[in-house]
Image (tube, rainbow, N blue to C red):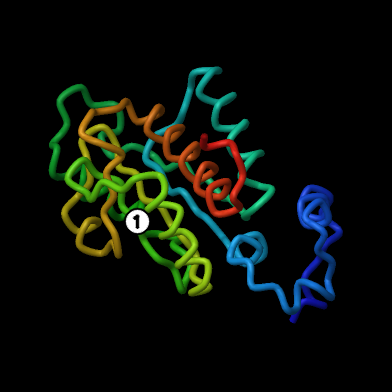
Amino acid sequence: MLESLSLQWSPLRDVVSKWGYNKESLSTCQEPFLTLIFMQNIVIRAIGKLNEDWHQQAIHRYSKLISQFAKLDIVELQEGQKGAKKPDIQLTRTHEALELDKGIPKNSYLIALDETGRELTSSDFSKKLGQLADSGKNIVFLLGGSWGLDESVRQKADLTLSLGPMTYPHALARIVLLEQIYRAFMILGGRTYHK
């Protein structure tokens, strides 16, 4: 199986070789973090576009950091209110739920971000990512629009996750999620970023 893995991608090859691993030693490696490097596929499906330059810069920064460890795909979807100042909230949520549901890869573990969700420490979140890497499933995060998630999304999710008791603007929530994903990889690797 390891022969089919490509170590041609420079950041990945550099990370693996810094730790003294090569294709032969990886075949007997028991490091869960290295499993993550090769197996993880993360998709973020989010309602709404990020328009501010600093939002884009933060997303780019964390996406680049995460790309050392996983394939990351961020999909921005259209908001359901279509510009209405006073939209029908339930209709908006229903439309956004349909958009979030389209294109989810097969064999995915769905994590919906919602204020009613379960709060995890960064350490517990990293353990969850490690378990999911071992399962070989894609990890798909679902982020609703400004009117929240439709109940159907929460019911379909394997895990409903809260970023904490405070409310964040959607752009900032997306950035915090990316930072926590990167932090989780660093924790799993025993690296010092999270100290």
Relative to 136, 143 lies left or right: left
Relative to 165, 137 lies left or right: right
The residue positioned 82% from the left and 50% from the top of the image is: 14
Tell me which corner region of the image, top left, top right, bottom left or bottom right, holds residue 122: top left
Query: How many numbered callouts?
Result: 1
Q: Against 179, is 39 above or below?
A: below
Answer few, some or many: residues within 10 Å of disc 1's Cα (few below 14, many 20 plus, some between 14 and 19). Answer: many
Tell me which corner region of the image, top left, top right, bottom left or bottom right, holds residue 159: bottom left
Residue located farthest toward the top when viewing the structure as drawn: 53
Q: Against 124, is 36 above or below?
A: below
- 51 or 39: nearer the viewer: 39
- 133 or 137: nearer the viewer: 133
The residue positioned 52% from the left and 37% from the top of the image is: 194
- What element does badge 1 sit on? strand
Residue located farthest toward the bottom when viewing the structure as drawn: 1
The residue positioned 53% from the left and 18% from the top of the image is: 54
Disc 1 marks which residue? 111
The type of residue carrying mark 1 is Ile
Q: Find residue 186 and report its horizontal and vertical position in percent.
A: 58, 46
The residue positioned 26% from the left and 54% from the top of the image is: 160
